[in-house]
Amino acid sequence: MSPAAALTTVPELPLVDETPTVSATPSPTALSLFALLPTPTPTPEPTRFPTYAPTPDGIVRTLRVPILMYHYLSEPPPDADIYRRDLSVSPTLFAEHLDRMLAEGYVTVSLYQVIDALQRGAPLPDKPVVITFDDGYRDNYENAFPLLRERGMVATIFVVTDFIDEQRPAYLTWDMAREMLAAGISIESHGRNHVSLAGKDDDYLVWQALGSLETIEYELGVRPRFISYPAGEYDRRTIEIFQSAHYWAGVTTRQGATLDNQRLFELPRVRVRNTTTADELIRLLSLDW
């Protein structure tokens, strides 16, 4: 039986249900995972984040919560192309962003808090903001993490699991991820190898969804619940597969700050560029979009 065929035997559980966990192995394979899914096993301890999805109360909600999207947190090299320069925010500028947000009364929250608010109406601060980093670059640990920790702020890092396993020098190590997790930074999935998830067959999507999930769970002892689609590319089948693999939500590259609990796998974000000053950031945070 193919991994995708096995997927159809797993009931698609809404967020109201308890999410079963699986026994992790050092070498994730979609086929072995799906064989295990029907038999829930205890979540490894300690577990920092909840194993239950928030129970929907039947109310359709939209919330205005900006989700900031960063990438590199360093000065780009002299020979950097236009894309690298655009995606690079210097540590000095990032510190200005953080200090300005604090001065304006913004409070960083996790995606777990956002989902709880969308599904159950759980309270959020008056001016919530989510900070996310895509790709899991090493400078997120070296430069962003100390600045966040000094200010008592939290963030989410979406990692490419194969890149960490391959020990690519530009990316995090699992030890770095463990240290940040212990300090309140969420580590979530950006897929296995940063390949587009649009237009792919079911077996490939299963390999991406469960391969990255199992690796993070094995290495960190917590199960990721959120996917950031590589390059922002996905389709309806992508959403269905990740939802069936018991992810809770997905973030996109679509601009905006209005979140809808009827579209949890298409949450918009606010892109932060190397030209985004602190004043511009506050302007973006205040937009009604």
Image (tube, grey):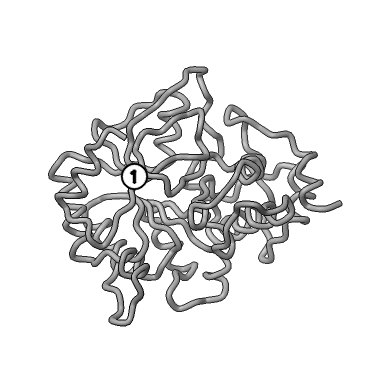
Question: Mark 1: few, some, or many residues within 10 Å (few <14, many ≥20)?
Answer: many
Point out residue 77 in the picture as x, y percentages from the top left corner. Answer: 30, 79
Point out residue 236 in the picture as x, y percentages from the top left corner. Answer: 62, 41
Q: Is residue 82 above or below residue 257?
A: below
- Left or right of residue 171: residue 31: right
Q: Is residue 247 above or below residue 186?
A: above
Q: Quadrant of the C terminus?
A: top left
- Left or right of residue 114: residue 20: right
At 49% from the left and 40% from the top, the residue drawn is: 266
Question: Label 1 is placed on what type of residue?
Answer: Val
Point out residue 75 in the picture as x, y percentages from the top left corner. Answer: 26, 73
At 55% from the left and 55% from the top, the residue drawn is: 221
At 34% from the left and 38% from the top, the residue drawn is: 257
At 18% from the left and 49% from the top, the residue drawn is: 280
Q: Nearer the viewer, residue 199 or 107?
A: 199
- Left or right of residue 102: residue 218: right
Q: Secondary structure at mark 1?
A: strand
Point out residue 196 in the picture as x, y percentages from the top left corner. Answer: 57, 58
The mark total stands at 1
For disc 1, the marked residue is: 130
Q: Quadrant of residue 83?
A: bottom left
Q: Nearer the viewer, residue 205 or 181?
A: 205
Q: Nearer the viewer, residue 101 or 274?
A: 274
- Left or right of residue 268: residue 94: left
Q: Residue furthest right?
A: 1
Q: Residue furthest bottom?
A: 79
